[in-house]
Image (cartoon, rainbow, N blue to C red):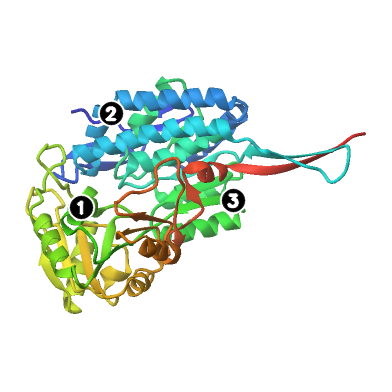
């Protein structure tokens, strides 16, 4: 399996050398994958200038022709799916099965945005006076500065890039330096299928330098970021000072409400798969499980048995069911949260420690913590790892109150056969989405948005596409 040569992409030019570098490693083994060139201030400026020049032409390309380019990108991603999935697993750690699913979702995102970009219609508004025409037009906002994370580096970048391109905007993307190879590989496919030079630029480097340069440049007209709440707050302040549109998809701490009428065996099968996917490194991973007291013991027992039986290992090995955490910082966070929970009276049913899978790897055992309460750090802050926390409730209202107690509001889940209970949860839960009786998240045709500290604006769906336009009102009177 070949890992791509790491490069910057600026105005169609691949820059591989002559820059300081950062080592990229496989989180399962510690093996070196490559050396990543880090952009200079001059490189960032060139990328901005390239996006600005390309925007003058790209915005004039018809939505139909832009759609054809995006469709070709989607097709190329599907054709190269096995190679792309291997790259993703090598640098991020997730299993090949999970990587294939992410690559498919990436292709889906480009495909759907290709079609939706043709459907930005504007409006004709009936006038108050004779001889007057009133129009509402949507115009591409301009070059976009995009920041994507390491946990789902392909699909989360695709949400930003595909949407911007479909809207007629150009992009300067800063992916995570931990997982650069997958975006280099996808960017190469974009150029190969005919995306014009400068429309899509990729830079790596010091996050603070890149973000401040992009946001302060008058040529960049919109910012989109997926990452932590503190960084999101900082970027929001910078964008506000520069009067720029910004979309933020930040942290989550998803609650799962499990009512007494649940099919325990089916629920546990679904819940364990969702919780430990990508080693729990998902912003909307189910983490805080609020279970009705009548089925609590059975749920915890079955869930713990399934968690304890998961096979940890290198994601490239077919038998592996859960890969590593990305780095030692995530391992330290798991240790601290587990110790805090135990110190405050919780019980570790299974896991709770590192696993010796490979000397250079970062593996944490799937962990189940019972009798968790709201005072524990893991119940208040995003876990972003393979820890599941279980609490009891007696009434659904009590469970909803507990679920809403955090300042994050991205995803939520509930399992019940009662339509009345579904409506109560749907109306009261404080989250950007709620999924009933399945661990589903919004597909490209639906908006993905957080509330409270989980974000501003939304990605995907027509709603996410429209965030890439300025609105212009036109009033024409007869002479």
Residue 314 falls in image quadrant = top left
Residue 137 location (% of width, % of height): 69, 38
For the point 28% across and 28% down, the residue is: 81
Distance in Å between CA atoms under marks 1 and 3: 37 Å
Which one is nearer the viewer's eye here, 361 or 478?
478
Q: Secondary structure at mark 1?
A: helix
Provide the residue designation for mark 2.
81
Q: Is residue 31 left or right of residue 238?
A: left
Q: Nearer the viewer, mark 1 or mark 3?
A: 1
For the point 12% across and 56% down, the residue is: 307
Q: Is residue 341 left or right of residue 236?
A: left
**Looking at the rendered structure, which numbered label has been put on residue 276?**
1
Provide the residue designation for mark 3.
244
Q: Is residue 165 left or right of residue 315?
A: right
Q: Secondary structure at mark 2?
A: helix
Q: Is residue 125 above or below residue 426?
A: above
Q: Is residue 43 visible?
A: no
Q: Is residue 17 left or right of residue 468?
A: left
Q: Pointers 3 and 2 in contact (CB under 8 A)?
A: no
Which one is nearer the viewer's eye here, 360 or 470?
470
Distance in Å between CA atoms under marks 3 and 2: 36 Å
Say whether disc 2 or disc 1 marks the residue closer to the N-terminus: 2
The number of callouts visible is 3
Crowding at dot 3, Cα within 10 Å, few <14 / some 14-19 / many 20+, comes out as some
Quadrant into which the N terminus falls? top left
Quadrant into which the C terminus falls? top right
């Amino acid at each position: 399996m070949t890992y791509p040569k790491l490069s910057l992409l600026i105005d169609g030019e691949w820059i591989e050398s002559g820059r300081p570098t950062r080592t990229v490693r496989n989180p399962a083994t510690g093996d070196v994958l490559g050396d990543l060139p880090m952009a200079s201030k001059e490189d960032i400026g060139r990328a901005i200038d390239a996006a600005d020049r390309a925007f003058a032409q790209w915005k004039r390309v018809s939505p139909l022709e832009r759609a054809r380019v995006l469709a070709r990108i989607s097709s190329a991603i599907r054709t190269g799916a096995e190679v792309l999935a291997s790259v993703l697993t090598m640098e991020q750690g997730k299993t090949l099965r999970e990587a294939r699913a992410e690559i498919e979702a990436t292709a889906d995102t480009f495909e759907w945005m290709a079609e939706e970009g043709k459907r930005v219609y504007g409006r004709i508004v009936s006038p108050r006076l004779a001889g007057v025409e009133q129009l509402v037009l949507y115009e591409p906002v301009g070059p976009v500065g995009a920041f994507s994370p390491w946990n789902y580096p392909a699909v989360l970048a695709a949400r930003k890039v595909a949407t911007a391109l479909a809207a007629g905007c150009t992009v300067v993307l800063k992916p995570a330096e931990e997982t650069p190879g997958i975006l280099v590989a996808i960017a190469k496919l974009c150029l190969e299928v005919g995306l014009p030079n400068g429309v899509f630029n990729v830079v790596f480097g010091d996050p603070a330098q890149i973000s401040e340069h992009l946001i302060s440049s008058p040529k960049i007209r919109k910012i989109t970021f997926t990452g932590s709440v503190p960084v999101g707050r900082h970027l929001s302040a910078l964008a506000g000072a520069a009067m720029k549109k910004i979309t933020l998809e930040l942290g989550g701490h998803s609650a799962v409400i499990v009512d007494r009428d649940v099919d325990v065996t089916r629920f546990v099968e679904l819940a364990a798969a969702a919780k430990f996917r990508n080693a729990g490194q998902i912003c909307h991973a189910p983490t805080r499980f609020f279970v009705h007291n009548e089925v609590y013991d059975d749920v915890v027992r079955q869930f713990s048995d399934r968690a304890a039986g998961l096979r940890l290992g290198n994601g490239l090995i077919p038998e592996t069911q859960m890969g590593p955490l990305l780095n030692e910082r995530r391992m330290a966070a798991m240790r601290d949260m587990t110790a805090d929970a135990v110190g405050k009276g919780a019980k570790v049913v299974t896991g709770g420690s590192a696993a010796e899978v490979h000397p250079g790897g970062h593996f944490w055992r799937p962990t189940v913590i019972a009798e968790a309460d709201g005072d524990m750090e893991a119940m208040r802050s995003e876990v972003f790892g393979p820890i599941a926390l279980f609490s009891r409730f007696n009434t659904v209202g009590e469970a909803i109150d507990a679920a809403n107690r955090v300042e994050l509001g991205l995803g939520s889940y509930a399992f019940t056969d009662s339509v009345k209970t579904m409506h109560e949860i749907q109306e009261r839960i404080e989250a950007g989405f709620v999924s009933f009786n399945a661990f589903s998240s919004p597909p490209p045709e639906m908006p993905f948005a957080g509330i409270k500290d989980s974000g501003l604006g939304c990605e995907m769906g027509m709603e996410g596409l429209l965030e890439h336009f300025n609105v212009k009102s036109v009033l024409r009177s007869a002479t």
